[in-house]
Amino acid sequence: MRIAIWWEQDSWGGVDTHLLTLLRNWPDKNDQFVIFFNSDNQGMMRISPALEQLKMVSVVPFSMPSSLQFSLFARVVRHFSLPLRFILMKRRAQRLLASHGHFDALLSDNGGYPGAWGSLAVLWSGAALGFRIRMLLVHHAAITRAALRFSVESLIDLGVQKWATDLVAVSRATRSTLIEQRGFYTVRNPIRVVHNGIDVSLEIEELQIDLRAHLDIPVDSFVVGMVGRLERYKGQEDLILALGELPPERLTKVVAVFIGGGEPEEMARLKAIALKTGVVSQVRFAGYIGGSASMLMRQFDLLAMLTKDFEGFGLTIAEAMWVGTPVLTTMVGAVPEFVSKEIAVMVPPEAPDEVAEALLQVMANSEETRQRAARALLHIGKFSGKVMAQRFHRLLLTSGV
């Protein structure tokens, strides 16, 4: 089977980790994959060395206009020109796909919904080219249609349900948003759920960087880490505010580490919060660090995932569990689909006071924390990359049957 993967993305994150895990664990090594990706895709930059080791994978970069529009006029024009831009996206994708021969299947790997409009237009291209299988994969939540182009987006949504032979979400929570926010009609086209998987077959990467030495963290400190871009909805500020609620004698023993890049404005805001709450000496902003997330997370005493509103799956949680790192997480989105209080500490979102109390409990009950992490390690093995890849492979084999 010859499979085209269309992937438009700006930053790095869970989508690229998912793709790499899927391809590494693909059951039929005779299948051939061609990944079409935008040339400024940071996720591809991150995983390209690993992809080069996979003989059945080739890559095709393409250029596309920047989505950054700084003037109000440019943003307004971009907003209302969606119908024309969508047609042009379809034509561009169709030409590019056709120039690389026929494909048996097309996988459009999208973040949220609608996410990258080009990732929806390519489904139209695949239908026009006669590809038998056309799959849309959605990783994050769907958002409501824009009020001033409601009708246009409604038509595109109807088109997507027609152009795609298969709709797949990484969680039931993501599936629900497609129905509730975009009105997807599952009688017309079912939305299947294939949970994310972690690459349990890989050996845990050796330490390439000692975080404590690199970030000047005292050896006896309790390190609470967060991995991911600095974005307001990710909840980094809630961990900083929680530090401010700790008793002084406990605060001096805790260091919060934030690994991941972000907009300078957001980093400045978080640093200002740390300064105003008197915890700046206990906070480290590490920026983006190369290497696997698991290599970094196994140096944490606790991984925190404090997303405020919605989490499409929570791959960082699964990866931390696999390396034996205890987890503190908010109960949002898909997290309760694979996490329980028996294997992780769970708190409501937007609750720095409860985060602070959880930190105190974890630090005071090290044996209970170790037991919870041991149970998590056994549990998360059920969410393997091999199982995930087998389910995608089965979907492709049975599509249209």
Image: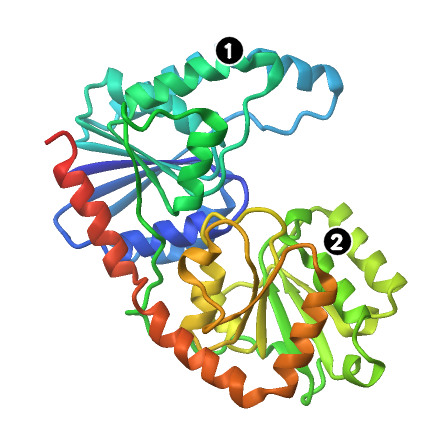
> Toward which corner of the image does residue 398 lie, by quadrant?
top left
User: Closer to the observer: label 2 or label 1?
Assistant: 1
Query: Is any atom of residue 55 visible in this view?
Result: no
Q: Where is residue 211 in the image (x, y as percent from the top left)?
A: 61, 76
Do residues under tags 2 and 1 come within 8 Å of each other at their CB atoms?
Answer: no
The structure residue drawn at horizontal position 20% and vertical position 25%, both measured from the top left corner, is 131
Q: Does residue 235 appear left or right of residue 395 in this picture?
A: right
Graded by Cα atoms within 10 Å as few (under 14), some (14 to 19) or many (20 or more), the crowding at tag 1 reads few
Against 122, residue 379 (above or below) is: below
Q: According to the image, label 1 marks what residue?
A: 151
Type of amino acid under label 1: Ser
Against 123, residue 220 (above or below) is: below
Q: Position of residue 200 (x, y in %)?
A: 31, 69
> Toward which corner of the image does residue 362 lie, by quadrant?
bottom right
Q: Position of residue 203 (x, y in %)?
A: 34, 75
Type of amino acid under label 2: Met
The structure residue drawn at horizontal position 46% and vertical position 39%, both measured from the top left corner, is 111
> Toward which corner of the image does residue 322 lie, by quadrant?
bottom left
Please state which of residues 276 and 368 is positioned toward the viewer in this rendering.
368
Task: Identify the mark nearer the N-term, 2 or 1.
Answer: 1
The structure residue drawn at horizontal position 41% and vertical position 74%, both measured from the top left corner, is 376
- Name the secondary structure under disc 2: helix
Q: According to the image, label 2 marks what residue?
A: 267
Against 71, residue 198 (above or below) is: below
- Name the secondary structure under disc 1: helix
Query: Is any atom of residue 230 visible in this view?
Result: yes
Q: Position of residue 342 (x, y in %)?
A: 46, 73
Mark 2–mark 1 Cα distance, whole angstroms, equals: 38 Å
Classify the position of the N terminus by image quarter.
top left
